[in-house]
Image (cartoon, rainbow, N blue to C red):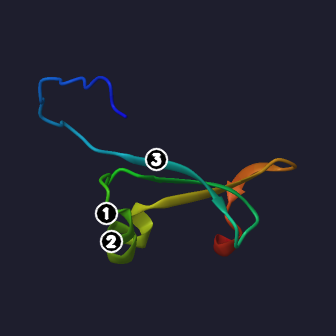
Amino acid sequence: MVETVLVEEQVPIARELFLAFVIDRALGCETVIASASGGMEIEEVAARDPKAVLRESITPASGSGPSRRER
């Protein structure tokens, strides 16, 4: 049950970015997904312009590098 609600003044958004840390089960590792084309429709951005979305795989043993799909 909600006990408190905080209401703030709405301000204009100057710029939206997208950044996510996800577990890519297909690759078996963590992946960072980022885009300067922000917003919630990242799938649409990726479909329209795949180069606008950066995918970087991270493996504990070797660190970060190009995802296996890009190699």
Mark with earlier residue (3, 1)? 3
* Residue 41 - label: 1
Residue under circle 2? 44
Q: Where's the N terminus, which quadrant?
A: top left
**Within-10-Å neighbours for mark 3: few <14, some 14–19, many 20+:** some
Amino acid type of the residue tagged 2 in the rendering: Glu
Q: What distance separates the C-alpha of mark 2 from that of mark 3? A: 15 Å
Which residue does the image show at 43% across and 67% down from the upper left?
51
Which residue does the image show at 82% across and 47% down from the upper left?
60
Amino acid type of the residue tagged 1 in the rendering: Glu
Percent position of residue 15, x then y: 24, 40
Residue under circle 3? 19
Percent position of residue 6, x then y: 24, 23
Q: What distance separates the C-alpha of mark 2 from that of mark 1? A: 5 Å
Mark with earlier residue (2, 3)? 3
Q: Secondary structure at mark 2?
A: helix
Q: Secondary structure at mark 1?
A: loop
Identify the image quadrant of residue 43.
bottom left
Q: What distance separates the C-alpha of mark 3 from that of mark 1? A: 12 Å
